[in-house]
Image: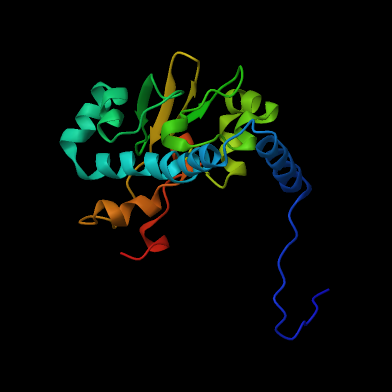
Amino acid sequence: MAHDHHGDEMTEPPSEMALRVQALESLLVEKGLVDPKALDVIVDRYENRVGPRNGAHVVARAWTDPAYLERLRADATAAITELDYTGRQGEHMVVVENGPKLHHLVVCTLCSCYPWPVLGLPPAWYKSSPYRSRAVIDPRGVLAEFGTVLDEDVEVKVWDSTSEVRFLVLPERPEGTEGWTMEQLIPLVSRNSMIGVEKARPASGAAA
């Protein structure tokens, strides 16, 4: 039931997990085991420097720069490093391109190998046993659950990430984005589209 508090500002209380994290952080700082400034640097890295926007930058660059696309095809790790996206979990990258008759889906069947430098932290569903098994057994069913329904003549290819290689899906560029700049294209690229469970957002989903 909704309640009218007549302008009183209400905020959601922290979750139990958030409270536990805060309590643990406070205890570690109090005992001198953790430097708060170091924590801030780590948080900033994963919120602003490591995450899906990095991958979206890679995709948008490939969409707008044919020479970069060729370098990405030839050596994805080196091409991604050009944009200063490096680090653990991103040392051995391979980019797979979606097309009109081919759709790629990425999974890690053994654990949760994932390209952190370009996609950030893996979502909970990516690490779950149901996704890891069903992505291989019933990829079209998994895609449908994410709202991605493909024509029967579209081949679905599943790529199994390992500690040796990580995959990044290059989604198809949405129609109607000819002439768009990289800055306009980046918001169309979601984390899920770079895993392959969804397509890039349509041009109508962003202001050009």
**How far across and down, in percent of the image, does residue 206 sit?**
39, 62
Quadrant of the drawing holding the N terminus: bottom right
Residue extending farthest right: 1
In the figure, residue 87 lies in which quadrant? top left
Residue drawn at x 52%, y 37% is: 38
Residue drawn at x 75%, y 51% is: 15
Marks counted in the figure total 0
Quadrant of the drawing holding the C terminus: bottom left
**How far across and down, in percent of the image, does residue 144 sit?**
58, 42
Work out whether residue 75 or residue 147 is closer to the camera in this orientation and state it: 75
**How far across and down, in percent of the image, does residue 79 sit?**
26, 28
Work out whether residue 79 or residue 143 is closer to the camera in this orientation and state it: 79
Q: Is residue 134 visible from the viewing direction of this image? A: yes
Residue 111 is left or right of residue 68, and the answer is right
Residue 130 is left or right of residue 55, and the answer is right
Residue 94 is left or right of residue 24, and the answer is left
Residue extending farthest bottom: 6
Is 44 situated above or below 104? below
Work out whether residue 193 or residue 153 is closer to the camera in this orientation and state it: 193
**How far across and down, in percent of the image, does residue 56 sit?**
37, 44
Residue 50 is left or right of residue 26, and the answer is left
Q: Is residue 103 visible from the viewing direction of this image? A: no
In the figure, residue 177 lies in which quadrant? bottom left
**Scheme by which the image is coloured:** rainbow
In the figure, residue 36 lies in which quadrant? top right
Residue drawn at x 49%, y 24% is: 158
Residue extending farthest top: 164
